[in-house]
Amino acid sequence: NRDGGLPYYPMSKPRTIWLPLFRGIRPLVAQWRGFWRTPDPLLLHEGGSGELTVALLRLLVIACLFVMPLVAILRNPESRVAQVGFWSALVALGIAASLFFLAKRSFYRPWFGFVTSITDVTIVSGVLVIFLVLDRPDVVANSRIIYPAYFVAVGAMALRYDARICVLGGLLGLLEYA
């Protein structure tokens, strides 16, 4: 009671309750900032060579998978499933060839791994969405070719030696499939 009016209560007690919480958040923020930094130059170089390996793997896998829709469309040209499979495999093959061309030219930048990982996951999700739009949920749920491509895409993320790419690509695949 300084001036004879209401009693004076300092705000020290609420501050002491919240300060430990804020002290615990500060190291977490520092860890996340460290996580999202560009990796050191040696890992960046290895990520570039890993990107070339992934580009070659992507091209070979899609080229092998292209044979199945090609045979299916030759057997039954009116089948919507065969047509979607053929055209989506053809588009994916074109994308894979262009990404292989860029990786072969040593065009690796820190963002290139993000772009290719997002592309890999989104191609698979896009084909599944097309089958859903065509009212073929049986193909989406029971595909032995399209769904395992998610595992190839997620496994290929590890060859880029960048944890940020793995986290972002994995979360994107999870969100797109959900």
Image (spheres, rainbow, N blue to C red):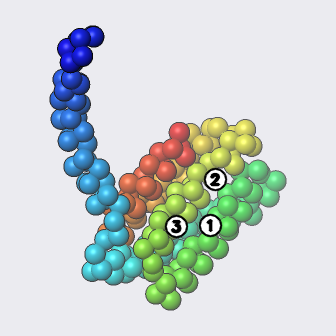
- Does dot 2 land on a helix, a strand or a loop? helix
Q: Is residue 71 visible?
A: no
Farthest residue to the bottom: give it: 105
Nearer-N-terminus badge (2/3): 3
Q: Is residue 46 above or below residue 14?
A: below
Q: Position of residue 141 (x, y in %)?
A: 56, 39
Inspect the image, locate mark 1, and give the three-letter code of the amino acid beneath it: Ala
Image disc number at residue 127: 2
Do the numbered discs 2 and 3 sit on residues whose CB atoms are within 8 Å? Answer: no
Q: Position of residue 177 (x, y in %)?
A: 53, 44
Nearer-N-terminus badge (1/2): 1
- In space, the residues marked 2 and 3 are separated at their CA atoms by 18 Å
Do the numbered discs 1 and 2 sit on residues whose CB atoms are within 8 Å? Answer: yes
- In space, the residues marked 1 and 2 are separated at their CA atoms by 10 Å
Quarter of the view holding residue 13 = top left
**Left or right: where 96 falls relative to 117:** right
Inspect the image, locate mark 2, and give the three-letter code of the amino acid beneath it: Val
**Left or right: where 11 falls relative to 163:** left
Comparing 91 with 31, the one in front is 31
Question: In percent of the image, x 57 and y 56: which residue is there?
Answer: 122
**Left or right: where 53 falls relative to 13:** right
Q: Position of residue 61 (x, y in %)?
A: 50, 68
Q: Nearer the viewer, mark 1 or mark 3?
A: 3
Question: In percent of the image, x 58 and y 51: which residue is there?
Answer: 125
Nearer-N-terminus badge (1/3): 1
- Does dot 3 land on a helix, a strand or a loop? helix
What residue does disc 1 label? 92
- In space, the residues marked 1 and 3 are separated at their CA atoms by 15 Å
What residue does disc 3 label? 115
Comparing 7 with 32, the one in front is 7
- Does dot 1 land on a helix, a strand or a loop? helix
Do the numbered discs 1 and 3 sit on residues whose CB atoms are within 8 Å? Answer: no
